[in-house]
């Protein structure tokens, strides 16, 4: 696969997993956890045996697809077949694919359970189960499904859990499903990777959009992800950015799968430069070229912050994460910093003049670059004629005007979001809603109107 040396989490967990141990692995975003479970998983399975021997569960459909692709890269050398199974995909096609006897299934829990009930997935031969984004999978939204699924699995299976974040209560729940697991935490001072620069900007709710546009003009990201709190927010934001001339599209759980797939594909190909997303895109996605992450709205919980910003600065690359906090939300920044053990840098909201200036500077740089490197022979004659008509400063100014992206300030109205407010931890270690966890003290926050249902409500609600 072209990898040269193991990352620390791979180095520490692969030998244990190969010995058959249950493992909880925690390491920062973008440090190769997929291969850390993928390599022992593929190694353990028998290509000759035509049954499902490995199951990987992920919280989102896009992640199921990505993990399945990564596992396929590892597995093809051994003739092991990997199949992604997730909601929003045609059921009959899935059943047909399942009949071809894949060795590994990478699935979202809801659709996996549908197949379990229809008996189109047989679990008797399962030897290894992986929960990717384990803490999310064991959070209130998924815990019941996961419990049901794991109860159907052979007891002597091996269980691996991976995530960049793993709170104590979640770890305790996890151990109920595991056999005396080894807990591997890659030693790192901070939960977030050092190569992500973290900045925050204090900004009023109604000024957020203009500030975002200016930042996009100034920072000139290659690819950027902008996180919004709700689906409505994502729709409004992506439309507003589009209106201002940015190549932006939105992704969230209410869009049909074909749309979700096409948006993500365009983003990976660079045809969409700004992906506006709910937390559905916060975990696990590995998209190269994401140089900037903007938290347009602060996330509901600090763990989500870690995962969101981890969409940049992966596999040793650098990245910039910028978070907006309204004046009432400054405390939440502190809560985040308490988890990450890293202070964010304060940054001033840029002014319109700064944005315009920067746009000109970028054009000027490009112009100089072309002047230096391109073959301009074919243009010289016209250039000389033009200079007979107007002076050079006027002429270059005209060129700059033509080439500079005009800062678009057309008015945009977004529905205002209520600021986050501090709340007691929203569920305890047994997944009960609204109770303080047994360790007491620890608080987290969520929006004034929670948009996630407590466990036991319709499954649709769990889709972000
Ligand atoms: N040993 C390695 N050397 C170099 N690159 C690697 C190595 N292992 C994995 N990678 C690459 O690093 C990138 C990030 O890997 P991966 O998606 O597994 O991270 P992760 O730890 O699961 O992150 P997250 O917490 O966001 O899910 C991928 O593009 C992967 O191919
Ligand atoms: Mg991952």
Image (cartoon, rainbow, N blue to C red):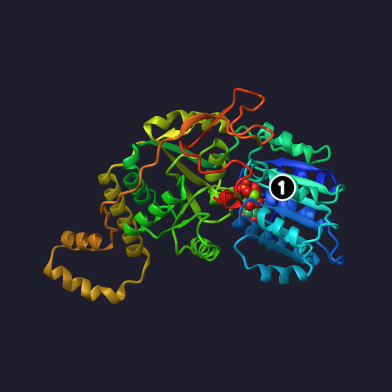
> Residue lying furthest left in this view?
389
Residue at the spot 84% in from the left edge and 67% down from the top edge? 50
Quarter assignment of residue 163: top right
**Residue 459 image position (x, y, % from top left):** 61, 51
Residue 175 vertical position relative to residue 147 in the rendered view, above or below: above
- Residue 254 visible in image: yes
**Residue 331 image position (x, y, % from top left):** 46, 28
**Residue 347 image position (x, y, % from top left):** 38, 36
Residue 357 vertical position relative to residue 259 in the rendered view, above or below: above
Quarter assignment of residue 417: top left
Residue at the spot 77% in from the left edge and 37% down from the top edge? 175
Left or right of residue 159, residue 136 in this image: left
Left or right of residue 253, residue 75 in this image: right
Between residues 85 and 22, which one lies in front from this camera angle? 85
Q: Secondary structure at mark 1?
A: helix
Residue that numbered label 1 is attached to: 146
Between residues 191 and 82, which one lies in front from this camera angle? 82
- Image quadrant holding the N terminus, namely bottom right
**Residue 437 image position (x, y, % from top left):** 64, 28
């Amino acid at each position: 696969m072209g990898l040269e040396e193991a990352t620390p989490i791979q180095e520490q967990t692969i030998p244990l997993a190969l010995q058959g141990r249950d493992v909880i692995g925690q390491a920062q975003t973008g440090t190769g956890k997929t291969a850390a479970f993928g390599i022992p998983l593929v190694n353990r399975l028998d290509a000759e045996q035509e049954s499902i021997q490995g199951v990987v569960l992920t919280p989102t459909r896009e992640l199921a697809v990505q993990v399945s692709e990564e596992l396929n890269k590892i597995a093809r050398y051994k003739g092991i077949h990997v199949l992604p199974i997730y909601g929003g995909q045609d059921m009959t096609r899935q059943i047909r694919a399942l009949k071809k006897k894949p060795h590994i299934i990478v699935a979202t829990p809801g659709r996996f359970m549908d197949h379990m009930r229809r008996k189109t997935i047989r679990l008797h031969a399962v030897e290894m189960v992986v929960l990717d984004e384990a803490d999310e999978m064991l959070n209130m939204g998924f815990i019941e499904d996961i419990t049901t699924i794991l109860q159907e699995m052979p007891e002597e299976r091996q269980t691996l859990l991976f995530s960049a974040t793993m709170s104590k209560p979640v770890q305790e729940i996890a151990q109920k499903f595991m056999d005396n697991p080894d807990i591997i935490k890659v030693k790192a001072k901070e939960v977030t990777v050092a190569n992500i620069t973290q900045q925050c900007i204090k900004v009023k709710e109604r000024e957020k959009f203009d500030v975002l546009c200016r930042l996009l003009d100034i920072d000139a990201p290659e690819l950027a992800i902008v996180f919004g709190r709700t689906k409505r927010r994502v729709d409004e934001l992506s439309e507003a950015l589009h209106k201002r001339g940015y190549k932006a599209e939105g992704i969230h759980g209410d869009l049909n799968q074909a749309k979700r797939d096409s948006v993500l594909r365009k983003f990976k190909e660079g045809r969409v430069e700004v992906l506006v997303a709910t937390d559905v895109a916060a975990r696990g996605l590995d998209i190269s070229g994401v140089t900037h992450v903007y938290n347009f709205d602060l996330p509901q919980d600090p763990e989500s912050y870690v995962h969101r910003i981890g969409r940049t600065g992966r596999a040793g690359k650098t990245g910039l994460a910028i978070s907006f906090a309204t004046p009432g939300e400054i405390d939440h920044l502190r809560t985040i910093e308490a988890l990450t053990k890293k202070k964010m840098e304060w940054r001033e909201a840029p002014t319109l003049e700064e944005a315009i200036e920067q746009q000109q500077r970028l054009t000027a740089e490009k112009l100089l670059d072309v002047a230096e490197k391109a073959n301009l022979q074919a243009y010289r004659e016209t250039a000389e004629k033009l200079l007979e008509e107007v002076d050079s400063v006027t002429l270059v100014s005209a060129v700059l005007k033509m080439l500079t992206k005009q800062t678009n300030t057309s008015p945009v109205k977004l529905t205002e979001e209520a600021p986050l407010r501090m709340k007691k931890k929203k569920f305890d270690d047994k997944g009960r809603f609204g109770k303080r966890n047994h360790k007491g003290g620890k608080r987290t926050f969520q929006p004034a109107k929670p948009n996630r249902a407590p466990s036991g409500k319709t499954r649709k609600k769990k889709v972000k």
